Image (tube, rainbow, N blue to C red):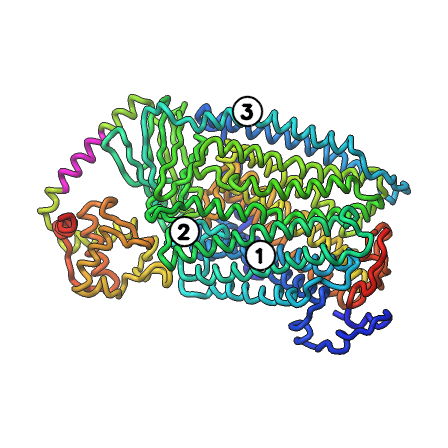
Amino acid sequence: MAKTSRYRCSLLSLLFVEMASAAEMPLNMTQGVTDISQQVYHLHMTIFYICCAIGLVVFGAMFWAILHHRKAKGVQPAQFHESTRVEILWTAIPVFILIIMAIPATKTLIAMEDTTDAEVTVLVTGSQWKWHYKYLDYPVEFYSLLATPQKQINNKIAKGENYLLEVDRPLVIPTGKKVRFLTTSDDVIHSWWVPAFAVKKDANPGFINESWAKVNEPGIYRGQCAELCGKDHGFMPVVVVAKEPAEFDAWIKEQADIQAKAKAAEQELLAMNMTMDEAMALGEKTYLGYCAACHQAGGGGLPGAFPALKGSKMATTAEGKAAHIDIVLNGKAGTAMQAFGKQLTMQEIAAVITYERNAWDNNTGDLIQAADIHAAKTGKKE
Amino acid sequence: MSTVTHDHDTAHHGEHHHHAPSGLKRWLYTTNHKDIGTLYLLFALTMFFIGGAMAMVIRAELFQPGLQLVQADFFNQMTTVHGLIMVFGAVMPAFTGLANWLIPMMIGAPDMALPRMNNWSFWILPFAFAILLASLFMEGGGPGFGWTFYAPLSTKYSGDSTALFVFSVHIMGISSIMGAINVIVTIFNLRAPGMTWMKMPLFVWTWLITAFLLIAVMPVLAGTVTMVLTDKYFGTSFFDAAGGGDPVLFQHIFWFFGHPEVYIMILPAFGIVSSIVPTFARKPLFGYASMVYATSSIALLSFLVWAHHMFTTGMPVFAELFFMYCTMLIAVPTGVKVFNWVATMWKGAMTFEVPMMFALAFIVLFTIGGFSGLMLAITPADFQYHDTYFVVAHFHYVLVTGAIFSIIAAAYYWLPKWTGHMYDETLGQWHFWCSLISVNMLFFPMHFVGLAGMPRRIPDYALQFADFNAFISIGGFAFGLSQLLFVWVLVKCIKGGEKATDQVWEGAEGLEWTLSSPPPYHSFTTPPEVK
């Protein structure tokens, strides 16, 4: 009962405090920003109006009968109970309406599935619980993670405007060009959805799906993973920024440069050693961004689902060290543990392993350097 | 219940009656269709409240943005087990319970054809659900991959509760198949002389067709869960591309079961409404034959539309077109049914007792669920609706205000026959109106939330959805509380009340109304003559 009254209080506060935000939720499907999404919207409205019209006739007749053909009015019930003509009529009319409806739906569907002649192609890879974007025409690729702080989700601090719909690095595409999305997954099935493009395509592990969008207006478009993909399914948003082609070209060139430089710099970094404090600071940041969703911020894991790192054999013994580096680099087949070797820099991996071996009373004193990771990586290849 | 004491006025010897054990053993050993029907119905009611409690947890968490009461993985377990319990524990056993009670009485038989199997098919059910519910207390929690358990989330990436889940689904399936066999054998063999196929009450017809659907698809479900089990534990790769399998294959097999399953949960409801509307309109059912044909067409079409659940999985465009057209076609026989019910009411002399109220609400709200189903059939639009709250709204309209409203209507309609007492009409009307208002507060706004872009199965959401979700949750709590009124009405009616006549309802027709209220322990010991 106490709970109920608390709900009531919070409802009242919701009604009054957030009245302003109430108007923000659209009540209908978005028209979107592509020609296809407009067509989809119009199909949606057409079928909706058809349903309304049928509903009006059927429910109208039903409520007329309820009002007029009631015993309380002293009517005598009629006894008719069959009419082949009427049955044929109300079989044929719906068939006719459906054929009318199927024609535009077929046209739009065929257009939606035509992914030929794309000017830009992006490989979209889902994994628990983030998206990876790789431009097939440019040397640019990156992960896109939820940017909403955990504290907002846990109600410790006020929620931001784009709560749960914000990422650290959005996908950037050009306007006015046909952009093809190839969708796949590294683990379970995800679904990449941007309502403004009317694109929702499942990311199936081991298979590649195609979809496309030609965006008419520059802007920021937000969506979410639409297929249940495990614990943090609700926390893997999609953000796409559409830029004018010239701006896009400048952006992609800049990104290509940055990524090329980072690769070169990584070689130099191999020679540099982090201090324990530096490693722990970078390690904590990396841990909270990539590991804590499963292994939890305190390293305790979730018993039965995700193993604890705190006090684990692998993270606390000298013999476990090589295995520890290996599992972070290459993942563990058949489990949710991913291969982070391609997601994180060697320095980050070194730092996060250092962190895991020293935080939460694990206190091994081990300090791992990027060079160790490099050795493990290359040793593997040989 | 006291049905057992009412059979000495008839002429038969009542052998079973003399040897019948009492107390718990009576219910454990019973082979009587009424006892087993009662057990099924009480079991379904219990499961309805357990599954409902899980829905309350879901709605409480979604009352406000942020994670307050439960964590994300437990939330997923709640949506999963809520779905499984409501589908396999509440709706299906309730219909089987109604079949047990009503089919022998409607066709003029003494009992079901296979009484021992009947006992068994019920008594394995509590074990199935005990296993499923127990899995929630395992280390790592219960199944959290949705009631649709898509691979590889349910194979490589699931906890060990999956094994319990698989075994419990197997037991539920065996129970359903045995129930279905019993219904078919009973209807084929035990009809009273003169009851030809086209004289059977529609409830019997719809259940007969449902039973065939069950026998056709429950083995498919059993196959699916077995493949999940072997993929997870025995190194097979049915659903793993790395071993030559395909995760989308899972969805094809699952929905080949899953779509007919949807009709398994609605065809008996059509039969119930087709019994109730003529009674309270005091006018014969319009288009009996076309109702039978429409039901059969829906059942046949149900095998041709499964992939409309999977439009976003990436199918060839011709497959998408095929499944879109077939799905749209289902609207035709379903429309015929609705038109026939309205035509039955037309120029009738209607009264509005509680069963009729629930049946009328069924017709309107189920049709709304049908409309959103028609919208979902339009493949390009489905890309936008798929896996959003629009879908949640759709299937709750057909399952809650459809299937469950029909079950409640059936309970009110036949309760006086079963117990010999009239239920409390005032309380019943309160129950109806509270349910009607709250169920629409609960599910109608979900259409808007879905169109605005809220995915289903998420424990937390963007701020724009906050107000609607708070409102929906209040509707949910109100609907949950309203069902306590139902329990009150049931208990009151079972304990006593105004004596019901044999006919009970002025306009009621059918063999069950020729029996005493409550009916004798062995319904018809000498077959009645049907003219």
Q: Are marks 3 and 2 on the same chain?
A: no
Disc 2 designates what residue? Answer: B153
Q: Are marks 3 and 1 on the same chain?
A: no
Distance CA(mark 3)–CA(mark 1) = 39 Å
Contact? badges 3 and 2 (CB < 8 Å): no
Q: Quadrant of residue B344?
A: top right
Pick whichever, A97 or A88, lies toward us. Answer: A88
Please tell me how crowded label 3 is: few (under 14), some (14-19), or many (20+) other residues with Cα within 10 Å.
Answer: some
Distance CA(mark 3)–CA(mark 2) = 36 Å
Disc 1 designates what residue? Answer: B88
Per the rendered image, the range of residues in magenta is A254-266
Task: Tell me, yes or no, whether the highlighted magenta stretch contains residue A85.
Answer: no
Pick whichever, B355 or B7, lies toward us. Answer: B7
The residue sitting at 20% across, 64% down in the picture is A363
Q: Are marks 2 and 1 on the same chain?
A: yes
Q: Amino acid at mark 1?
A: Phe
